[in-house]
């Protein structure tokens, strides 16, 4: 679609002001982050919350469709129109498998379904699934590592077994004076920004596809092919292969030189645009694409004014590694944060950065649909 860029951009900016507010961002983030989403089961937990939000926003009247467990991939799909920006944001979170019966009461061996990064005890809860697709989350404890092995430490009367999942979990908390948020943010924060962007794009009639993948983590390992299996299933089954640009949305680390300035993310930094992930082991944007996106987003865009090139911060691999095997038009865009896997404390980010990320996604979609952002050379 080619449209009048100034008119579309102006309408999108107005819709951003109306729909991407501090309160709307915080409310949606709390809904997503406080719902457990172990890998492989995010569609029936957080996906149900996304459906409730979708209905509440009345997005179907704007021609937007929501497909939970799209074509049995486990991924959830929001789409409006064809040929627009494709966004990938993983809906699952750090989780563990019950690996054996207890050694002593209240100490259960578990196996990481992720990279275990927590250097000390990390708060966690049990998520139990039932044959009819319902689930419960009640028992709480903590994940610990002893002698190179991992355990869930909980009350002695808690009984676990195969099929139960352990999720690292902390209720969302927000300092409204600064925008600092803590909780289960990886990747609830990215999902929140993407959903808010989708609501704006639906409002102004700009096409997009948003895929909320169900298995970004997978077994820990050095190879990129051990992760992003949810995205791989989506690309294998999807017929929507004509997206001109794909963007992977996840948490990014800020450069070391900026860590003191953000004060644990009590100070906003901006949305983060990276050229590559995992020191180049993940995806790498073509240099001309990165240059075009950097200039488009970071040099006076009328929709967003808070995007920064991230040079020097550690950007983890995410669904971008699979996307890059299907198209070389892949960008890595995210939000600054710390302790993504409860590394040295609670995950943290800044709500104002999430709002900038949502606006940046809107700007990218508008740029693609109006052909103001060059993706073909």
Image (tube, rainbow, N blue to C red):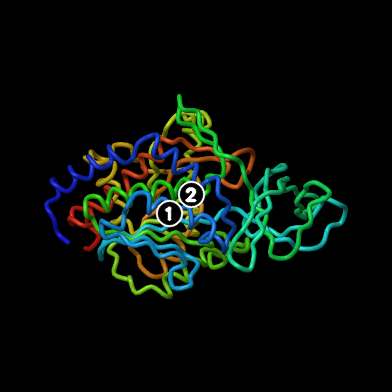
Q: Are marks 2 and 1 in contact (CB under 8 Å)?
A: yes
- In the rendered image, the quadrant that contains the C terminus is bottom left
Secondary structure of residue under mark 2: loop
Secondary structure of residue under mark 1: loop
Q: Toward which corner of the image does residue 27 lie, by quadrant?
A: top left
Which badge, 2 or 1, comes first in the chain's sequence? 1
Residue 1 is left or right of residue 32, and the answer is: left
Q: Is residue 104 visible?
A: yes
The residue under label 2 is 315
Q: Viewer-proximal residue, 80 or 237?
A: 80
* Image disc number at residue 276: 1
Q: CA distance from mark 2 to mark 1?
A: 8 Å
Whether 189 is drawn above or below 129: the answer is above
Q: Toward which corner of the image does residue 347 lie, by quadrant?
A: top right
Residue 126 is left or right of residue 44, and the answer is: right
Counting from the top left corner in percent of width and height, residue 11 is at: 19, 44
Tell me which residue sits at (77%, 54%) in the image.
148
Residue farthest toward the right in the current orientation of the protein: 104
């Amino acid at each position: 679609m080619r449209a009048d860029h100034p008119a579309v951009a102006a309408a999108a900016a107005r819709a951003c002001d109306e729909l991407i507010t501090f309160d709307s961002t915080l409310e949606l983030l709390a809904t997503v982050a406080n719902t457990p989403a172990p890998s492989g089961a995010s569609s029936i937990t957080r996906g149900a919350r996304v459906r409730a939000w979708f209905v509440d926003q009345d997005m179907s009247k704007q021609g937007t469709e929501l497909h939970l467990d799209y074509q049995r991939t486990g991924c959830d799909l929001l789409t409006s129109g064809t040929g627009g920006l494709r966004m990938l944001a993983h809906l699952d979170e750090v989780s563990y498998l019950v690996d054996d019966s207890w050694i002593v009461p209240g100490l259960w061996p578990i196996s990481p379904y992720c990279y275990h990064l927590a250097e000390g005890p990390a708060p966690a809860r049990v998520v139990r699934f039932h044959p009819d697709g319902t689930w419960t989350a009640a028992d709480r404890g903590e994940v610990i590592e002893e002698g190179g092995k991992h355990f869930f430490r909980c009350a002695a009367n808690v009984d676990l077994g195969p099929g139960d999942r352990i999720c690292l979990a902390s209720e969302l908390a927000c300092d409204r004076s600064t925008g600092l948020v803590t909780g289960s943010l990886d990747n609830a924060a990215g999902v929140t920004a993407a959903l808010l962007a989708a609501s704006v794009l639906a409002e102004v009639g700009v096409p997009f596809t948003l895929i909320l993948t169900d298995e970004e983590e997978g077994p820990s390992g050095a190879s990129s092919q051990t992760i992003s299996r949810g995205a791989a299933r989506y690309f294998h089954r999807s017929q929507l292969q004509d997206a001109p640009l794909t963007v992977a949305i996840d948490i990014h680390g800020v450069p070391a030189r900026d860590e003191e300035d953000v004060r644990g993310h009590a100070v906003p930094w901006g949305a983060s645009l990276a050229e590559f992930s995992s020191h180049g082991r993940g995806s790498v944007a073509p240099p001309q694409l990165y240059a075009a996106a950097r200039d488009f987003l970071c040099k006076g865009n009328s929709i967003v004014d808070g995007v920064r090139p991230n040079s020097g911060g550690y950007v983890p691999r995410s669904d971008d590694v699979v996307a890059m095997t299907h198209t070389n038009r892949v960008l890595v865009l995210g939000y600054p944060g710390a302790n993504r896997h409860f590394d040295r404390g609670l995950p943290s980010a800044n709500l104002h950065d999430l709002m900038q990320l949502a606006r940046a996604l809107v700007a990218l979609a508008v740029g693609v649909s109006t052909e103001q952002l060059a993706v073909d050379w």
